[in-house]
Each structure stands twice: as structure tokens, then as C-alpha cells.
Amino acid sequence: MFEGFDALLLARIQFAFTVSFHFIFPAFTIGLASYLAVLEGLWLWTGREVFLDLFRYWIKIFALSFAMGVVSGIVLSYQFGTNWSVFSDRAGSIIGPLMAYEVLTAFFLEAGFLGVMLFGMKRVGRGLHYFATLAVAVGTLFSAFWILSANSWMQTPVGYSLNEAGQFVPDDWWQIVFNPSFPYRLVHTVLGAYLTTALVVGAVGAWHLLRDRANEGARVMFAMAMGMIVVTAPLQVLAGDMHGLNTLEHQPVKIMGMEGHFESHPEGAPLYLFGLPDETTATVRYPIAIPHAGSLILRHSLTAPMQGLDTVPREEWPPVAIIFWSFRIMVGLGLLMFALGLYAVVAGLRGRLYDTPNLHRFAVVMGPAGFVAVIAGWVTTEVGRQPYTVYGLLRTAEAVSPLDAPAVATSLVAFVVVYFTVFSLGAWYILRLMSHSPAPHEPGLETSDAPIRSAGITPATAVDPDRALGAETGGN
Amino acid sequence: MASFDLPTLWAFILAFAVFAYVVLDGFDLGIGILFPTLEPGVERDQAMNSVAPVWDGNETWLVLGGGGLLAAFPLAYAVVMPALYAPIIAMLLALVFRGVAFESRWRDPGHQRFWDAAFAGGSMMAAFAQGVTLGALLQGITVEGRAYAGGWWEWLTPFSVLTGVSLVIGYALLGSTWLIMKTEGAVQDHAFRHARIAGIATIVCVAAVSLATPFLEETYYQRWFAWPSVLFAAQVPLLVAIAAVAFFVSLQRRYERLPFLLALGLFALSMVGLGVSIFPDIVPGAITIHEAAAPESSLIFMLVGAGVLIPIILAYTGYSYWIFRGKVGHEGYH
């Protein structure tokens, strides 16, 4: 099955598979943790029961998503050693401390307060419980901070020197943490996570509005999600543009690949809307292009010259076709999100936010768009970094562990089988939770009067909210 | 003995993280290992209930152990991980099953038998793989230059299987004594019986591993029996014997907290014994902590964070345990 595959290619496939699978969960839970904090805050502030109902509705989905994110993340933290041991030896002194800070500031904070957030409302009272919810939300953002710092350093390495053993030795931690591409990547990724969550919440709200447009929970979640998209989608376009300019400055070859610029364009580069990049002939086949638009976007001038891959040795090229298309998928979905926001504004201004089935259908279809866009974005940035692990300094082919191909092949098969089994059951259950309309007195993870079997979780009420006995109001 | 410098300090911090992981995740893995012996229904529900709010925090120490090793001793991390490829991957996959089972078991009753099996099987496999990892490290791995140079089955020996089985039994001991503390009635009676069996088995395993270890490598033998370190080393088996006797007495008198504390003590003593055997190596017989250490700038940068944050983490972790203190009835938390 894996003849012709060497350990390097298998290790790359394994990393791509496990990291893409993992990233689905943080992309959702970063936004959802903040959303839960907003819902609980609004409930404490206004006293409106609907916010508590929504908090309880989404916390069940959060708990499962978070668990899947945690376990798939532990895999990644060990994969640096198992499959990329030379990278660990060379770059561990820089990447390791950044990840250690992620564990110390983020993972422990999230894990320490997650139990209180899920099960502790009656034990600690409202104030402390809200503190726990905020701690979990802040923890997810800390996590994004450190992991993006580590990833950005691999893209734009600064503040180091090399020793005789070929190891990167940190010289200036301030430069390392706040490396040149980090701020752009952090903003772009966190906005992406917020958009992803808003699209899911919006789709669930829209789904239930299509069935019953009077459902108060559905109305509130739909309005909040559309509000979030209206604000973040344009911001994301802006952040993406700035991130692109930053990449042009520090990783110009990546941009050449993303844009399909095999040739230099001294009088202004076109923007390829469509085309099939062909590396063997170094051309874009069947191009549909807007003349000069590439220069306009990247240099903000119609006639600015753009260099192409012809100025770079072949062995420095990233896989052009992959990033050309992943980039277009991301941008295309981003524009659709922008359109959804506009549609919602128009409907809202006409007072028909809850009575426009076409808008709701559009929102339902867009539900998974955030996940696809963030993965496409990661593919663009990670594949675009090739053939390097640490950009310009350590080649991916030199970073791999001295392993036999059968070992990597066996573990890859195991990961694929286990992930699809476990996470598809998890995802199926999340979808089932989402298919229930939010109800008044939504049961949470803890109920007081029902016969409790787990840590406050009553299966019967979770499956069928109508069977929830004595819904309680939280606090004591 | 090396002077007390930054690499030594980091070796102690990592040893602390590993110990915290072993005893904390040890008891919740132990619950999973005991799961098949518990009655479906109330018994299993209570057992899972007793760890649901804290398991995630417990497992975070594993990430700190792995991440800390990468950060403080990158060379050791780069050598050890490929050498232990199979058991590490097996452990990770097992933890995936078990972690998702925590959240899914209750809310997916249609697949409850699947999730119960995932929880029990995942816990056992994770514990066994961790024990194998330890045994494989102790028996030594092939290193050439800055990389692992052995095959991908080198970890599998009778000794590593012995350490694997021992850890499964040891975790079952932690799990059963934890249940004694957290439950009452029939579940607790059950846990008392389990604790006695697991206690006897653990002592046998500790003895077997201890007897085998000094003969794996000449250096272990010397570290244990060379004069004058034997004076210090000899205290460990003596203390183990005392703790073991106290443990069975505390079970006999049906103390509820003491058995768990004494089980922790047994683990602490085993850890000290391990330290005596390998220090100052980090890859036994191949690489010392000083050879593997990251540059000073990395160690200091992390020390600032660890010095401030680990005490805070311990404080709020303790607080979280305190919030969920007391017995878990099948009525849940009130």
C-alpha cells in the first residue's frame, strides 16, 4: 500500500493529517469559549433567562469539542519528537520554551477551570463560576498566542545564532516571541476562529429559525452570530491583506507560488482568478486573469514590478498547485462570509432578520465554511513554507527522524483509523446536540433534581430536553 | 554528584512534572483499569463521576513533561522519542479513546458499551505503554552521534513488558484507593477489596523490577551497591517495606484517606529509586543531563515562567480539587 513512499513523505502526510484534524477543534473552541463568556456575562448583567439557556445549550457542545481538541493536541506535542527528531534537536531550544509557556499559561489555566466551568455552578456561585468561564476563554487565547509565536518563528526566524552542533541558540527572546510575521498571523488566526464559531452558531440559529421563527433562543443566537460576522468578516479581509504584505516582505517565494507567478512581471502582475498551475512547464494553464490586479493588491500600485519563480532556483519552489488553490479556496470563502454579513445587514435594516428564509438557508450552507477556510489557510502557509521547516535555514528533508518507513506507515494507518472512528462519533453527537432546538430551561451539564448519573450529566435530559425534570436557574 | 546548576535544576523540575503526572493521571487511569470489574450502572457512574472534573488538568502534566523535555533537554527528546516510537504512539492513541469517552459516554447512550470499552481499554493501553516506555529507557537505547540508531522493535523485551504490567497494576492501586476516599457503600467495599489485591500485586511488581534493574546495567549495580551511596540507597527499600506494612494495616482498619496517601508514598519511593539509578544521565547509559541541556538562555527564559507559574498552577489546581471535595454520591455534586 505504501510502496514508493519514504519515511519523509509518510511523516509529512502524518503531520498534515493530525494537525489538520486537530486544528478543527481549537478553531471552534477559541471562539466558542469567548461566546460562552459573553453569554454568561449577558445573563449576569441583564438577568434574561435566554442567555443562560443558550449558555447551557452551547456548553454541552463545547465540552465535547474541547475534549477532542485536547487529546488530538497531545498527539502533536509528542509528534515533534517521534517523527521530527532532528528538528527537535536543532530547534528545540527555541520552539520548546515557547510551547512550555503555552502549557504553563494556557493549558493548565483551561484545564484547571474547565471542571468548575462545566460542573461547578452550584458549588461556587455565580461570581466565581463566571471567573472560571473567563479563565477558560482567556486560556484559549493565551494558547493561540504562544503556538502562533512558535509557528511564526519557524516562518520568519530571528533572534538566534547557530552553534557547532547545528542547534539554534536563542539570543533575544523578545525578538523571537514577537518575530516579524507573528502579529499578523495571530490576528488573522484569532479572527478566523471567531468567524468559524460565528458561522456555526449562525447556521444552528438559522436552522432552527427555518423550523420555528418564533424560537427565542434561535433568534438571539442568530442575531448575535450575524452581528459577529458583520464586524469580523471585513476586519478579516483587512487583516488578510496586511498579512499578505508581510509575507511578501519576508517570504516572497511563498507569494509567488500562491499567485501562480512563474514569470516575473516588470510592468505589473496580473491576478489569476482561475488557472491550473503546471510546475513542469512553469505556466498557468487556462488562466482567467485581471491585468495589473496582482500588483494592485500586493503593492497597492497598478504598475509595480513583481518578481516570479523564474528568479528562484527550482529546489527552492514550494508545491505551487497546492497553495495556489488552497489560497483561492480561503479567499473565496472569506468573500462569501462577507456577503453573508452584508445580506444580514440588509435584512436587519428592513426589520426582517428573522423572516428571510433565503438568508437563513444561506447561513446554514455557510455553517462549515469557517473550518474549510482555516484549514485552507493553514495549508497555504505551511505548504508555502516548503521545502523548509525553519524558513531558509532547515530543510524539511533534514528535519525528519531516522525511522524506518514501515514504522511511520503503521502509525499513520493507526492515526487515520482511530481519528475517523473516535472523532466521527464525537462529531455525529455534536450534530445531534445541534439538531435540538434551544429550549427555555435548557438543561446544562449539571441539574439538581433529576437523578444524576455522571458528573451532573443526565443522559435522558441531554438526549431529550422535554424530559428534563425541574430545570434550575443556576446560582444556588 | 554534579553541582547544583541550571540543567540539574531543570532535571528536578521535569522529575516533579513527571511525578505529578504519574500520581494524578495515575489514579484516573486506574479508574479506567478497574472499570471492567465495576458493575455497569451506579458503580461505574460513580467511579467516572469522581474524576470527571479533574482528569483534564491531570493529563496536562503529561504535556508539560513532554514539552519541558523538548525545551530543556532537546537532544534527549530527539533521541528518546524515535527510540520509543511504538509505545509512545500507542499511548497517544489510547489517550484519544479514553479522553473522548469521558465526554461521550454520558451523552451518547446509544454507544455506551463502545465508550465504556474505549475508556477501559484506552486507560489500560496508556498505562501499559507508559510502563513499557520506562522499562525501555532503563534497559538502554542505541545512540550514535546525536540520534537514535536502533530499530523500531528494540523497546520490546521481557523487562519492558514487566514494567508495563507493573504500571498497570500500580495505577489500579492508585485508582482503587482514590475510590475508597471518594465513594461510600457498595462501591467503597468493592474498592477496599480491589485495593488489597492491587496492593499485594504492586509490592510483588516493585520487588521484581527492583531486583531486575541493578542487573540490567553495570552502572545501576554500582550506583545501588557502591560504598557509601549504598547507605543512602538502602533507605529506599526499607521505606518501601514500612509503607507497605502501613498500607495493609490502614486497609484492615478501613481508613479512608490513608491508603491513598500511602499508595502515593509508594510511587514517590519508586521514583526516588529510579532517580538513584539513572542520575545524572537523562538517556541512561548514553547522554547526561549536561550533554542534553538546552542553552542557558533557554533554561533561564523558562525558569522565570516556571518559577512564577508552577506555584500558581498548583494553587488553583488544589482549589479545583477542594471545590469538588467529599464523596461523590450517585446524586452527583451538591
Image (cartoon, rainbow, N blue to C red):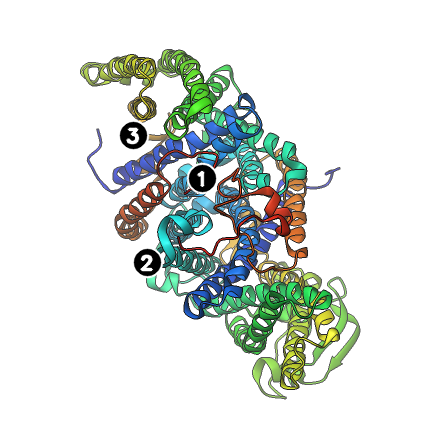
Q: Do badges 3 and 2 share one subunit? A: no
Q: Amino acid at mark 1?
A: Trp
Q: Amino acid at mark 2?
A: Asp
- Disc 3 to disc 2: CB gap under 8 Å: no
Q: Residue furthest bottom?
A: A302
- Kindly identify the residue that appears in the image at 29 percent across and 25 percent down: B272
State the SS at label 2.
loop
Of A295 and B57, nearer the camera is: B57
What residue is pinned by disc 1?
Answer: B55
- Kindly identify the residue that appears in the image at 38 percent across and 17 percent down: B217
What residue is pinned by disc 2?
Answer: A171
What residue is pinned by disc 3?
Answer: B280
Q: Residue furthest right?
A: A286
Q: How far apart, in angstroms, are the residues tagged by discs 3 and 2?
A: 27 Å
Say few, some or many: other residues with alpha carbon within 10 Å of mark 2 (under 14 / 14 to 19 / 20 or more): some
Please state, as top left, top right, bottom left or bottom right, where the N terminus of chain A lies in the image. Answer: top right
**Label 3: chain letter:** B
- Disc 1 to disc 2: CB gap under 8 Å: no
Residue B198 lies, with reference to residue A177, above or below; the image says: above
**Label 2: chain letter:** A
Q: Nearer the viewer, mark 3 or mark 2?
A: 3
State the SS at label 1.
helix
Q: Amino acid at mark 3?
A: Pro
Res B167 seen here: no
Q: Nearer the viewer, mark 1 or mark 2?
A: 1
What numbered label is drawn on residue A187? none
